Amino acid sequence: MRRPFRLGGAVVLGAMLIAPAGAAQAGSRSATDGLVRGARSALGEQVAGAGRSFGSLAQAPVGLRSAVAAVVQQKLTASDAASENFFGFSVAVSGSTAVVGAYAKNSGTGAAYVFVRSGSTWTQQAELTASDAVSGDVFGHSVAVSGSTVVVGAQNKNSTAGAAYVFVRSGSTWTQQAELTASDAASGDLFGFSVAVSGSIVVVGAPIKNSDRGAAYVFGQSGSTWTQQQELTASDAASCDHFGWSVSASGSTAVVGAPCKNSGTGAAYVFVQSGSTWTQQAELTASDAVSYEDFGDSVAVSGSTVVVGAEGKNSGTGAAYVFVQSGSTWTQQA
């Protein structure tokens, strides 16, 4: 289970370094990046091992062949790629538009890159940066896209109070439309750790808010103005739940993950909108839940279907759970 821990004079949350206000970041980030590289190397070896299980691509399952074919279509890289930018740490796609985050770009200032597809070719359309960017903001730690709207999280902004930035497209030009912050922002909240957008609704997670209970914030759009609509919290919130670690939105439904709930058993919460009010409709848990599974580490929603990841299931083997809606009731389907 990914709990915050100390590394030198900094706090490490998951794979992301959170530097204390005013502290030098370079040395600590190098140490943290080493941990990240090690973890990713191990993951890469697992993927390679899976590939060696088949004598050839033709012998692999159809699903795997399709996945490999999709990857082979094109590899996306930044036009100004540099070592340890961590391009690809976060990704999102909507139709023929893809967004890729590179939170470590320029000493942790961060960037996000927009790619558009024409036929089978993807071309970089824009590099997004914050209008008030500074080193250590980690802009690009989280990204989301819906149509011609992109949201990018910068959880370390303003002494780790955090921020999220909204960009809109006109033709082939992307312009920053808003910088979102919480109405009750405080240092250490990590607002922007997770972001989601669906049409004119943006959801931003702040998993360390209020002694790690966490919170998620909903913003609504009116013209070119984005206004905080509501602060979401769990009905059974407790310290160290990390509610807001993951967020997703689809129409009038939002889902928020709390992977540390109940000693890491985890939970995900479904909220529904009526007018400008959001109400908790359900708390989702796994039918075979046990401690330290991190259920809620990742969430996704589309229409009446929710998928929740539990990376710690079965000693880190991991699992994902599918829930479907019938009226106001959500039931685990798989």
Image (cartoon, rainbow, N blue to C red):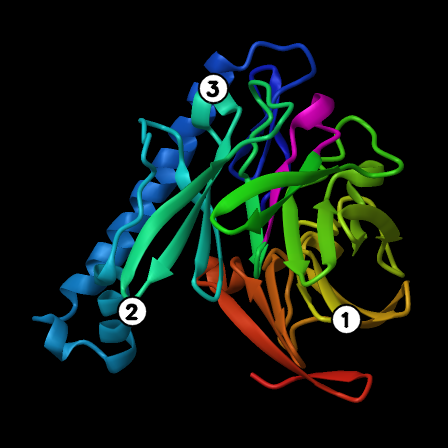
Looking at the rendered structure, the secondary structure element under dot 2 is: helix
Label 3, label 2: how far apart the Cα atoms are: 33 Å
Question: Residue 126 in magenta?
Answer: no
Residue nearer the viewer, 100 or 307: 100
Q: Position of residue 64 (x, y in %)?
A: 26, 73
The three-letter code of the residue at mark 3 reads: Ser
Q: Cβ–Cβ below 8 Å for labels 3 and 2?
A: no
- Please rate how many residues cluster around mark 2, counting C-alpha atoms within 10 Å: few if below 14, some from 14 to 19, many from 20: few
Question: Which residue occupies 51% across, 24% down?
Answer: 108
Q: Cβ–Cβ below 8 Å for labels 1 and 3?
A: no
* Mark 3 or 2, nearer chain start: 2
Looking at the rendered structure, the secondary structure element under dot 1 is: loop
Whether residue 28 is visible to the viewer of this picture, yes or no, is yes
Query: Which residue is tagged 1?
Result: 252
Query: Which residue is tagged 2?
Result: 67
The three-letter code of the residue at mark 1 reads: Ser
Query: Which residue is tagged 3?
Result: 107
